[in-house]
Image: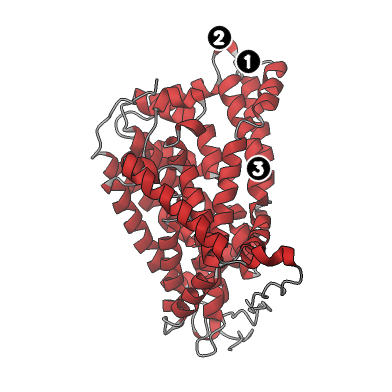
Amino acid sequence: MAVRDTDAPAEKGLARTAQALARGTEKWFPDAYIFALVGVLVVALAAFANGSSPQNVVDAFGNGFWDLTAFTLQMAMVVLTGYVVATSPPVARLITRLAALPNNPRTAVSFVALMSCSVSFLNWGLSLVFGGLLARAIARRRDLSVDYRALGAAAFMGLGAVWALGMSSSAAQLQATASSLPPALLRITGVLDFGTTIFTWQSLVMCVIIIVLTVIIAHFSAPTGAAITTAEALKVDLDDTIAEPPTRTRPGEWLEYSRVLPILAGAMTLGWLVSQLLSKPVLSVVSSLNGYLLVFLMLGLVLHGTPRRFLDAVARAVPATAGILVQFPLYAAMAAILTKSEGRGGVTVSEHLATFFTEVGGGGAFAVVIAVYTVILGLFVPSGGGKWLVEAPYVMQSATDVQMNLGWTVQIYNVAEALPNLINPFFMLPLLAVLGLRARDLIGFTFLQFLFHFPVVLLLVWLLGTTFTFEPPVIPA
């Protein structure tokens, strides 16, 4: 495998720009948890400025800290189920076959970007691990020298481009699940199933356009020739051999190695899914977050074949959920301070923000204003679901006030929410663990994607938004 010559000519074009961007972003960006802590302080200061008493603010902080306990577990399970499915033997064999398809370095990078975005439409957790393992498999090829940093950045494109436009979108899943919605938000929006968000033709068109743009940029920003830095040059161990579980030694372990139990559990899950599809509208079934997680978890069990292999995969997946578990309570606290800590005249910060967006978002500018705001806030709160709960009460109230379609407002948030991921490395963490790289190795390439995506996203949310009409929310009894 070729190793980069340190005396070789520097990269040119987009590849050169990507590396220049990497040096600055890695130097100045702290850990994502720091952003969350700072966010709590900023929100608290905003509440004080609004006239809230210290007692009201700390009460809202403490009382709201665990408001997202159920949703936190659900989001952690999205990551875990994606990891378990991606590391199963059948998927591993599929990855090996796919890795043999590209025939040159740039095609390999753009191919990984395409696969990452495509899989992300189904499950963003699956996309991270699947893309990372595909990048490693391509890097192991002896007949093809590919820049490992560009491969890694391409593997992240599902999270940096279209994840929130897919079926595992935290905001869309939340809006489609009445039991997960805070009562204050439910009274504003009602329940919005995937037919009003993910599966509108406007959202699907936007998704396709962004995927095409992502693949093109990945292709032309990939270093070639002497500018390539391989995994070997980066001293990355590419051995993905997974040790087989030890041979059972006690009678009590027999069921751990049984293939019958996973098959029976899979059959029960399939029976439940069929029953749901026969008794409920299809969109309400596929929009159910709990049902979605059940299917993916049992699919992972079936694909691993035995409970022992499945449990080993779960143990490897758990560390990737750490960031979600410790950060989501902070997002819940932020949302509580914004919506419950009353200031002068009994008005909350959330209500002030709703008034502001209503005033500046008239005349067709609402979509652009919300998208820009979402990107900025996303740099400090890198969480699709957690941040939606912070934004949604005032954003959706503003959308109602300016007669913007509520389903499209969710999609404006979704497409804009992905953009900060290209700069803030929080969601890179599980992928970096798979790749054996650091954020600085990827972020130059992803920052370059951001520079192209940002204006395109603003144009799309404005143009496609003009095709919608406002529909009043249906509030459940």
Residue 217's place in the image compared with 198, above or below, is below
Between the C-alphas of marks 3 and 2, the distance is: 32 Å
Q: Nearer the viewer, mark 1 or mark 3?
A: 3
* SS assignment at label 3: helix
Rendered residue at 43%/47% (across/down) = 272
Q: Which residue is mark 1?
A: 51
Residue 275's place in the image compared with 314, above or below, is above
Residue 325, position as x, y percentages in the image: 66, 45
Label of residue 281 in the image: none
Question: Pointers 1 and 2 in contact (CB under 8 A)?
Answer: yes
Q: Residues within 10 Å of mark 3 (few under 14, many from 20)?
A: many
Give the residue type that dot 2 points to: Gly
Quadrant of res 471: top left
Between the C-alphas of marks 1 and 3, the distance is: 27 Å
* SS assignment at label 1: loop
Rendered residue at 37%/60% (across/down) = 211
Residue 423, position as x, y percentages in the image: 55, 54
Give the residue type that dot 1 points to: Gly
Give the residue type that dot 3 points to: Gln
- Along the polypeptide, which appears first: circle 1 or circle 3? 1
